[in-house]
Image (cartoon, rainbow, N blue to C red):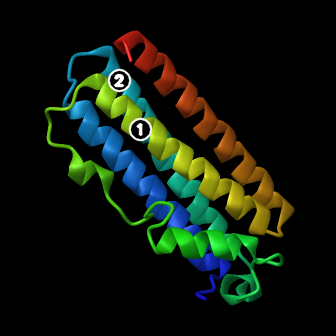
């Protein structure tokens, strides 16, 4: 089984946030002049902030934790990450923005964004469980709360778009 150290896990989190920001920016282009465009651009800016937070957390890791393979004391997180890397959960390296053709309806974008946010929440809950540093856990909790807020925002937009 593949094992992950903290540095690799935080790099995955950074990639997820980069991909999310790119998705929101590209989707916003489809709806220029509409309220949805502003919402999507605001979400992109929040994802940029999350990426910076994860980068800072990765850089703050003590050298031992950065490379330690026993990052996950219970082993459950490693099983989840292994399934994720194999594409059984979701692919953190996938670039959802590339899948946008420009003809998507608002509800299609919103549904895809909600799914993307839910995937990231599950990933961050797993990461939080694996992280031993309380300061990092608190920062991950903050990001999870913000991602939950993104789902709520997107869900309101979806309701307004008529499902």
The answer to whether residue 25 shows anywhere in this view is yes
Question: Could you tell me how many numbered marks the image carries?
Answer: 2
The answer to whether residue 37 shows anywhere in this view is no
**Mark 1 nearby-residue class (10 Å; few <14, some 14–19, many ≥20):** many
Quarter of the figure that contains the N terminus? bottom right
| Picture residue at 62% right of the left edge, 82% below the top | 4
Q: Position of residue 60 (x, y in %)?
A: 69, 71
In which quadrant of the rendered view does residue 160 lie?
top left
Q: In the drawing, does residue 150 fall left or right of residue 112?
A: right
Q: Where is residue 88 in the image (x, y as percent from the top left)?
A: 48, 66
**Mark 2 nearby-residue class (10 Å; few <14, some 14–19, many ≥20):** some
In which quadrant of the rendered view does residue 136 lie?
bottom right
| Picture residue at 71% right of the left edge, 75% below the top | 61
Residue tagged by mark 2? 38
Q: Position of residue 6 (x, y in %)?
A: 66, 77
- Residue 125 higher or lower than 47, as above or below: below
Disc 2 to disc 1, C-alpha distance: 15 Å
Quarter of the figure that contains the C terminus? top left
Helix, strand or loop status at disc 1: helix
| Picture residue at 26% right of the left edge, 15% below the top | 34
User: In front of the other: label 2 or label 1?
Assistant: 1
Q: Residue 138, labelled with which disc?
A: none
- Residue 20 higher or lower than 87, as above or below: above
Residue tagged by mark 1? 113
């Amino acid at each position: 089984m593949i094992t992950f150290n903290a540095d690799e896990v935080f790099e995955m989190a950074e990639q997820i946030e980069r991909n999310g920001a790119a998705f929101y920016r590209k989707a916003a282009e489809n709806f220029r002049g509409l309220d949805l465009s502003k919402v999507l651009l605001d979400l992109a800016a929040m994802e940029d902030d999350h990426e910076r937070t994860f980068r800072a957390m990765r850089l703050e890791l003590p050298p031992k934790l950065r490379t330690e393979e026993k990052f996950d004391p219970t082993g459950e997180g490693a099983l989840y990450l292994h399934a994720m890397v194999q594409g059984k959960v979701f692919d953190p390296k996938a670039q959802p923005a590339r899948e946008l053709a420009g003809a998507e309806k608002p509800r299609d974008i919103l549904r895809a964004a909600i799914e993307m946010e839910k995937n990231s929440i599950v990933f961050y809950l797993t990461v939080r469980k694996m992280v031993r540093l309380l300061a990092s856990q608190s920062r991950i909790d903050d990001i999870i709360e913000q991602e939950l807020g993104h789902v709520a925002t997107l869900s309101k937009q979806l309701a307004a778009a008529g499902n």
